[in-house]
Amino acid sequence: MQSSAAPKDSGAGPGPDPDHPRTPLEPSTEPRTPSEPSTEPRTPSEPSTDPHTPFELSTDTLHPSLTDPVLSSMNLLNEVAHRFPDAISFAPGRPCEDFFAAEDIHRHLRTFCRYLTEERGLTTAQVDRTLCQYGPTNGIIQELVARNLAADEGMDVDPATVVMTVGFQEALFLVLRALRTDERDVLLAVEPAYVGLTGAARLLDLPVRPVAGTAATGVDLDDLVAQVRRARAAGLRPRACYLVPDFANPSGAGIGLDDRHRLLALADEHDILLLEDNPYGLFHGHRERLPTLKALDRARRVIYLGSFAKTVLPGARVGYAVADQPVRDSATGRTAPLAAHLSKIKSMLTVNTSPIAQAVVGGKLIEHGYDLADANARARERYARNLDQVLDGLARRFRSRAGAPHTVGIEWNTPTGGFFVVLTVPFTVDDDLLEHSARRYGVLWTPMCHFYSGAGGDRQLRLSVSLVTEDEIEEGLDRLAALVAERCSRPGDRPAARSTR
Amino acid sequence: MQSSAAPKDSGAGPGPDPDHPRTPLEPSTEPRTPSEPSTEPRTPSEPSTDPHTPFELSTDTLHPSLTDPVLSSMNLLNEVAHRFPDAISFAPGRPCEDFFAAEDIHRHLRTFCRYLTEERGLTTAQVDRTLCQYGPTNGIIQELVARNLAADEGMDVDPATVVMTVGFQEALFLVLRALRTDERDVLLAVEPAYVGLTGAARLLDLPVRPVAGTAATGVDLDDLVAQVRRARAAGLRPRACYLVPDFANPSGAGIGLDDRHRLLALADEHDILLLEDNPYGLFHGHRERLPTLKALDRARRVIYLGSFAKTVLPGARVGYAVADQPVRDSATGRTAPLAAHLSKIKSMLTVNTSPIAQAVVGGKLIEHGYDLADANARARERYARNLDQVLDGLARRFRSRAGAPHTVGIEWNTPTGGFFVVLTVPFTVDDDLLEHSARRYGVLWTPMCHFYSGAGGDRQLRLSVSLVTEDEIEEGLDRLAALVAERCSRPGDRPAARSTR
């Protein structure tokens, strides 16, 4: 929570709340809005009608999610970043800011308006109405998104099965709302899992059951099957499994081609849906990209959740769901795609996604011939270079020349793309250590324990490579190494026989 | 539902889904996106793994809201409008389109960026980041909104108690999510009620109990108290009462000053919150404006739900909640404003409201010195003139010179502002009659029955005055009069002794 002395104005500075990158630490140095208001509400100008029992609410009478640590973790981490604005930050998963500018917004809007006039044949009044008036619930750029998915992912998507949303997060929420019928429904999620998944499920009182993730293969398929069986044996209905097959947040892990095919077969065999979240797929480093689950999906088992936050502009807040599953109306016998049902939910949640924001995304898509892989070539190179530099930097600092670790218990994975690397250390990693790291060493990162529902990740931290410069990486890793050295020299924290991975 | 032959492209035309105006009929003539995808999902390019039992979902296994007529009513009405694009429409509550243009978006954005540079002292990189990057969950223009509320409503609002949202609708959803703790919680709402209220509550399995509305005073205060007592006697917890004190949608009714004071006293006495929705307050016709409930609120009983859809631009999709109620954390004993809790929910629902969209609204606020009453002077005149013309037109068509109705059972209310008039007729008004009206007479309106949870409004229709021209009003009322004459001449529908209002 912010102290009441924190600056109140809200016009300044970007905010700390990322979508997919999902760590909320804020590296900017300018004063900015606290993400949470002051803890001391001002005294009302007149007393309550009964001054002896002034009206107040209690967390006891609000939805239980509001006291769930998951919903507060973002704010907690933001708060650390806010207090240490000069720290080098490996925390936020936001895209690199060198690749966008406010002036682009104007160009994208004009491109989209030209498309409406020239390709769609709209009059000026109709163009004005398209951007300024309310819009269709499902959106105004589904056709362009389908072209983009064809260009970037080789996916053949009917625009009628696409719902444009306020970022990936709303798309996820719509799907979870549709699938959560009653208290018997549960969701599976590969752990460690993005907090936005856990938080959205919490808002809907939808339990999340963890499926073991592995650094090597992304998901433990045997555990997936075991979890489905265990849930069914308990009288529950596992509806879907959430996963990020490409360079997952927070683990950086990826799922291989054979396992993708196996996953689809298992989903069909065990009658569950797969929720595929793919914000980082285009940032595939120097290796070939694998097809998405949705591109391989022949049985309509995959709901694809898309984001333009990393590939177009986070500030547009535009994402989408591809939901082509036929839904039979039990009363009429007619079928409609799941997207039509998500649209009904959306109409009561946000009515429609800002057509201005969609126009910005649409304009960029048009400018690049719908090919965001091409549009993001420079960004991809940047992230790949940063990832290599972080991995090399870890090796130089934590491995002997023979390749063995200097210190027992120090390990890290080697993702081939995306934004994230997970470092395992031989001491406890928690919010207190983050505070210490920020205060004493001026370096920020994300404790992995935030991504586990139970125990897990307590000796791990996530390093994000997307927002740091070359110099910051070297200096930041030096600072991190100093923190590690300090902790490893403390008797109580010295690596024991216990394996930390 | 759209037939599969409906145009699929989504780039064209504004959509039919309004926020507050809340009737989804679409008067535009250009081809546009169906608000719901095709009913016939395409055949998958390869068969399911088991061709005999292809995978499909059933509405039986989706959340019950999806088969609730409330969630489908918007789409149903859209569909009628879509099939009769040339009809004169008194249906949509969207703001008049003569007052905005796509070019304004560019100017507003530049104004906001200049403010960031000149008033807030941001560098170009910081401005770029503010608009393009993720932003704070609570928003970036709360300070400007507070200045607007001071200018327009005489309200003294701490920006730290404001949460910027994706339109009014998300603000409402955040509040309902916070208040709905378990199955004992219920919401009260003045009926007839906006379908967006009923729909949002349905998504959260939160029962809505109707409070009688009256055309004269807006809300029946005795019934409010009776409903609170009845709910408590049934072991339930009435948490709040939703109302639109100024020119309500759909009734057009308003609440007088004395009743506003009484409402606040009753809320305190009976320990409930008031959810004040105020999209039409600035369109007060030719009378003086009354203070909002929130402006009169000394006991923090009012959560104010704001919208810029009517006063700035619907396409920005920006609204907000003012939630200054102190919430005590039962674990720590510390208090924080309810806004801080709404922010936690928002972080898992939409992460943050597009800073680009907020910048558009912020720019307009700055351009008009935060005074939207002044900025909307021409719009207010237009709506007031239209309202007068509709009321006069009804009188000319349905009253004798002596002022008595031509036909028993034809009545209408006389709102002093806002967008809506309710016409009562001596025959059943339903979706079938709307279809008949569109096909035979080329005039659209909204059946009032959609705004009632049980019986109610079955002989009433809503006329919206915001989007029609002078000529359309005369021609449209002629067509409506022809429909009324036809129905009144049918033996079965002839007015009986039964009073219809």
Image: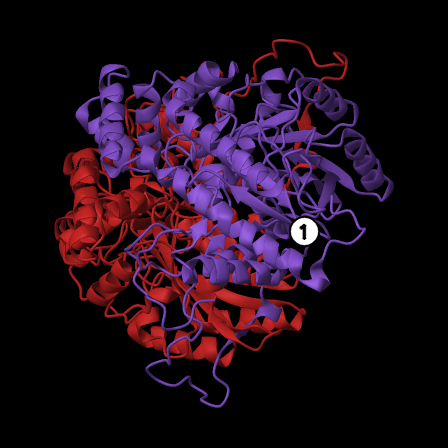
Chain colours: A red, B purple
Of B136 and B387, which appears nearest the observer? B387
Position of B99 compared to B234: left or right? left
Task: Estimate the x, y position of residue A200 in percent, counting from the top left.
Answer: 51, 49
Q: Residues within 10 Å of mark 1 (few under 14, many from 20)?
A: many
Position of A106 compared to A351: left or right? left
Q: How many numbered marks, from 0 up?
A: 1
Q: In the rendered view, would you say A234 is above or below B412?
A: below
Residue A22 visible here? yes
Considering every residue shown, the one lying at the far bottom of the view is B52
Q: In the rendered view, would you say B469 is above or below A144?
A: above
Considering every residue shown, the one lying at the far front of the view is B401
Image point (26%, 44%), residue name: A125
Image point (47%, 18%), residue name: B152
Q: Amino acid at mark 1?
A: Arg
Image quadrant of residue A55?
top right
Task: Estimate the x, y position of residue B187 in percent, counting from the top left.
Answer: 69, 41
Query: Mark 1 falls within which chain?
Result: B
Q: In the rendered view, would you say B277 is above or below A215?
A: above
Residue A383 visible here? no
Image quadrant of residue B259?
top right
Residue of label 1: B459
Q: In the rendered view, would you say B72 is above or below B312?
A: below
Q: Judging from the image, what secondary structure is the residue with disc 1 in?
A: loop
Of A272 and B178, which appears nearest the observer? B178
